[in-house]
Image (spheres, rainbow, N blue to C red):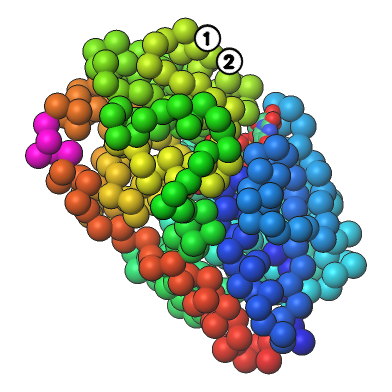
Amino acid sequence: MMKILIVFGTRPEAIKMCPLVLELKKHDNIECTLCLTGQHREMLDQVMDVFGVKADHDLNIMKAGQSLTSITVYVLEGMEDVLKKEQPDLVLVHGDTTTSYAAALAAFYRKIPVGHVEAGLRTGNIYSPFPEEVNRLQTDRIASYLFAPTQLNKSNLLREGRSDNIFVTGNTVIDSFAYTVKKEYRFHESKLNGLDFDKRRVIIVTAHRRENFGMPLENICNAIKDIASRYNDVSFVYPVHLNPAVRGTVSDMLSDVENVMLLDPVDVSDMHNMISRCYMVMTDSGGLQEEAPHFGKPVLVLRTETERPEAVEAGTVKVVGVNKENIISEAQKLLDHKDAYDLMAAAVNPYGDGHACERIVEAILNSEEFF
Ligand code: UD1
Ligand code: UDP
């Protein structure tokens, strides 16, 4: 019997790791234990409820307006006790959050092998996204099993001198749709049921990155305000991240704007079903850049770079930066020109076929180190 400890703590990690927890639990020769760090609270619990996954440990570390140092210290300390108690053969972490890096480091300090799901994403700039680029570099360095979503992610790892135990799996976010997306769907957020997705062009907006705090986020809000005033048939839906640094700016600038619906974070079922029905997405989120292309929805990335160039190359995602005029003109191209819209909407999603979790489990089961 092999013992695997999965550790995660934020919304996107939960969305991408719950399908893996459920897949691991199908195997009798694996004992799968789950530790939440609680780096997020409400936004994490929303996801756990949708997947019906229960944790065995919860470090419950979240503080309002927390610092990177406090997340790192509390996760490192909390994980020490959990690792001592559980003594896993393998620790699995995901992506680029501070939870993931600190949990990988805690496992390394006890010489427990780490598997990194969503390995090999890079921008090449340690300050953008900050601190995620360093979180994923360090987590990859510690990990002995690297589960890369795409061939390009694998080539990034090869370029850094890694060669063993790299598996190209697809992104587990695509697997999550099997649990969330329905043809006939009634939203849990009642305001969304009042929106006619056939009659109105719904643009979903999200933004939460540290690089965008302050002026860039103000530019994004001003661009939305401008577009909303020009197009009567467009409705913006903006589920606002709970970070106070985001909420202050967004509610000050957009709460009274017609055609802009500000919401608290919606659960992942609502979000995925909304993406599948919307016109397009404007975001600085990593996950949304992978999800929207699956449904053939164009994405304007409100950042100056991306670690996910695959969908840009496929033509379904465009990096438009954080200049107000540029955001407006790129959005207008998609609103005014059917050809430009159709070109982006027809693109293919390079992030997988919905079987990433099976591939990850198969790679673990085939590993001689554990069996
Ligand atoms: C974190 C990750 C980021 C990821 C994002 C997903 C790090 C350094 N950042 O950023 O990579 O893209 O999650 O959303 O790991 N808050 C709540 N309730 C919640 C969640 C957050 O109130 O459920 C508030 C708290 O005041 C918290 C603040 O948001 O202190 C910031 O949360 P934090 O995890 O530090 O940063 P994120 O921007 O969410
Ligand atoms: N998401 C959600 N509810 C929301 C906003 C986003 O369920 O109100 C989902 C979204 O579909 C995606 C994930 O959260 O799966 C992205 O998380 P986030 O943008 O917070 O982090 P990132 O992907 O940038 O790390």
Distance CA(mark 1)–CA(mark 2): 6 Å
Q: Which residues are magenta?
A: 337-341
Q: Quadrant of the N terminus?
A: bottom right
Which residue sits at x=59%, y=27%? 264
Task: Give amino acid for label 1.
Answer: Asp
Q: Quadrant of the C terminus?
A: bottom right
Residue 251 at what x, y percent from top left?
54, 14
Task: Give amino acid for label 2.
Answer: Gly
- Mark 1 vs 2: CB contact within 8 A: yes
Q: Which residue is mark 2?
A: 248
Q: Return the residue nearer the eye: 124 or 47.
A: 47
26 horizontally vs 64: left or right: left
Residue 304 appears in the figure: no
Q: Residues within 10 Å of mark 2 (few under 14, many from 20)?
A: few
**Residue 338 among magenta residues:** yes
242 horizontally vs 201: left or right: right
Mark 1 Cβ and ligand 1 under 8 Å apart: no
Identify the element where label 2 is drawn: helix
Compared to residue 150, the image places residue 289 above or below, namely above
Q: Which residue is mark 1?
A: 252
